[in-house]
Image (cartoon, rainbow, N blue to C red):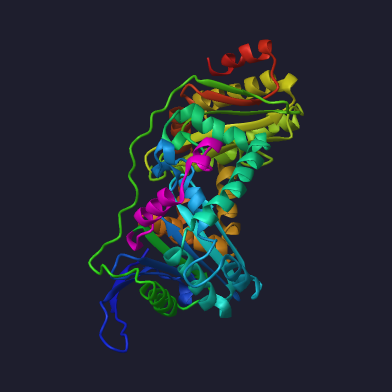
Amino acid sequence: MTSSSSPATARTSSEARAVARTQTLVKGANGIGTVRKTTLPGGLRIVTETLPSVRSATFGIWAHVGSRDETPSLNGATHYLEHLLFKGTTRRSALDISSAIDAVGGEMNAFTAKEYTCYYARVLDTDLPLAIDVVCDMLTGSLILEDDVNVERGAILEEIAMTEDDPGDCVHDLFAHTMFGDNPLGRPVLGTVDTVNALTADRIRRFYKKHYDPTHLVVAAAGNIDHNTVVRQVRAAFEKAGALKNTDATPIAPREGRRALRTAGRVELLGRKTEQAHVVLGMPGLARTDERRWSLGVLNTALGGGMSSRLFQEVREKRGLAYSVYSYTSGFADCGLFGVYAGCRPSQVHDVLKICRDELDHVAEHGLTDDEIDRAIGQLRGSTVLGLEDTGALMNRIGKSELCWGEQMSVDDMLARIASVTPDEVRAVARDILGQRPSLSVIGPLKDKQASRLHEAVA
């Protein structure tokens, strides 16, 4: 990783404007893969990655706000606001926003997570100025009208209903609640029917003004782009909206958070008339800044990250007890989760849970073999590169890195870090993580006798 600084100035027709700071964070070969960052007066950060070989560009704005920032009565406000920013601005109606991107064959969307929100558009490189103008307009000029709040409420309630109709998705929300309880990390990103119904336009507007200040935003663009041009266009869009008035403001630091309460040995069962039982067995993981995350990534890949993984082989290939079985990790600012998911017939749930628990206990005590670790390292390195083969993935990487870590790592550095993981490091993190007493979340039509046995999996 390299870093250099140089002043970048811009002028209006009437006066010299304040100086922006530009840095090269990652220096690519012949300019390919170069990551640059400019911090504007007013605290707005702009990061770009140049890839001249493509004809597309993805432009996104990341907001330093997620469901973790909500009080119990505001649960769902971040996601509600994500919807509302598409409903119209002082310059565009909702139809104007969508039709502008549709007219050039682009795609536009947004997503809300527990610690951040992202709005993005992917277009031809020649249409990048349009994408910049539209997305910046949405973030700075949203009206949040009461009529739009009332109309969108229905759409969000339908989205909640859709999620609840998908137990394979809903069980992960249940597991977060099992682990964190009534804590912001334990509440659903979408909110609940009651909290969404209680949110008013006035409360959402106040939430918007508090969390969408330029100091809380990171602009990210990747593809066949020019950094200075992107900076110039973004700056013009934000200044036009009057969003960079406080030129002394500085960006907020990456989130540190407060360690959430976590419990061991908890079991939560949500009875549903489903054809399958959906289970997540898991325990506390690692914060996203923990250096052991690289070793945990290798462990996760070997345990449940593909068709050759232990869990897939033991549960599906050898016994045919589940169609879908995998492990996963979630890292937050100060804590994390490690989970194993499986979907199976209700009559097989105890067999599946016993196999999963036995594998976790065995790996915690004895570790993985060197062959398993080597294969997992190769798989993780390959999937990392293949997952970055489009401009959307590149935009996600640099935007999230700036917002969550405050630094950038080149792909080569990432691959080298994964390759440097040793068997001893993987075995150590297996003892630390898998050696903990797990908790369990289940959704399905389990009868009383079956439900009473669920505690065996976490004993």
Number of disc labels: 0
- 99 and 105: which one is in front? 99
Residue at coordinates 46% horizontally, 76% vertically from top-left?
Answer: 31
The reply to whether residue 368 is visible in this rendering is: no
Residue at coordinates 42% horizontally, 36% vertically from top-left?
Answer: 72
Stretch in magenta: 189-215
The chief SS type of the magenta part is helix
- Across and down, in percent, residue 260 comes to 38, 33
- 299 and 277: which one is in front? 277
Q: What is the residue that sits farthest to the bottom in this orientation?
A: 13
- 425 and 168: which one is in front? 168
- Across and down, in percent, residue 189 comes to 51, 42
- Across and down, in percent, residue 207 comes to 39, 51
Name which quarter of the figure residue 358 lies in. Answer: top right
Residue at coordinates 52% horizontally, 52% vertically from top-left?
Answer: 149
The reply to whether residue 190 is visible in this rendering is: yes
Q: What is the residue that sits farthest to the front in this orientation?
A: 147
162, above or below 90, in the image: above
19, above or below 25, in the image: below
Instruction: Report the quarter where the N terminus lies.
Output: bottom left
In the image, residue 209 lies in the stretch drawn in magenta:
yes
| Direction from residue 207 to residue 341 in the image, left or right | right
Q: What is the residue that sits farthest to the left in this orientation?
A: 248
- 239 and 203: which one is in front? 203
- Across and down, in percent, residue 232 comes to 40, 79
In the image, residue 5 lies in the stretch drawn in magenta:
no
Name which quarter of the figure residue 340 lies in. Answer: top right
120, above or below 421, in the image: below
